[in-house]
Amino acid sequence: MAASPRVRKVALVAHIASSTGWLGAVFCFLALAVVGMTSPESATGRGVYLVMEPVAWSVLVPLAFASLVTGLVQSWVTPWGLLRHYWVLVKLAITVVCTIVLLLYMRTFEAMAKTASSDAAMDVVRNPSPVIHAGLALLALGVAMVLSVFKPQGMTRYGWSRRAQRSTAATPVA
């Protein structure tokens, strides 16, 4: 679907805003996870884990879905398409996998918040899992960002067939 330059720019701004917002929120979660895991103060650790779950539901999850939806819109309104270039497919896969992992990890956030709000020992909550997950998410989302900036060459079979169809349709018949 072709779109006007204005529509494409609005869609691009929405995608950049949601994707970089998601990346920034994950970076903040990494910092919170490190503080929660390493703080000598039990109250600080409990506070970190109590705030992570509601903030994840209200910030991380909406930004993940916004990034996914705006990325799909971008593929529909720009010449890049969804299935024409490998880098677009890799970005889509990264976004889908990160979103699914985030949704599955929300149970861990819930359990950590529940434990932090109880009288349980903080040793139960202080584990490297949130640091590892946030670090891997940063890595994956960083790769997606690099792909979107550099747009490495490589068309899919579908992309090549679409290009061939367009070039034969544009060739005048004598």
Image (tube, grey):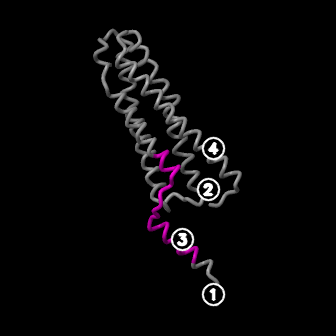
Amino acid type indicated by mark 3: Arg
- Tell me the tag on residue 77: 2
**Do callouts 1 and 3 mark residues in contact (Cβ within 8 Å)?**
no
Q: Is residue 82 left or right of residue 36?
A: right
The residue pinned by badge 4 equals: 13
Q: Quadrant of residue 16?
A: top right
Q: Quadrant of residue 117?
A: top left
Q: Is residue 174 left or right of residue 93?
A: right
The residue pinned by badge 1 equals: 173
- Residue 90 on image: x %, y %: 43, 52
Local secondary structure at mark 1: loop
Ranked by sequence position, the earlier of labels 2 and 1 is 2
- Residue 132 on image: x %, y %: 34, 31
Ranked by sequence position, the earlier of labels 4 and 2 is 4
Local secondary structure at mark 3: helix
Amino acid type indicated by mark 1: Val
Residue 92 forms part of the magenta stretch: no
Q: Residue furthest front?
A: 150
Q: Is residue 80 above or below residue 117?
A: below
Marks 2 and 1, Cα distance to the nearest angstrom? 30 Å
**Do callouts 3 and 2 mark residues in contact (Cβ within 8 Å)?**
no
Ranked by sequence position, the earlier of labels 1 and 4 is 4
Nearer to us: label 3 or label 2: 3
Residue 149 forms part of the magenta stretch: yes
Segment tinted magenta in the rendering = 144-167
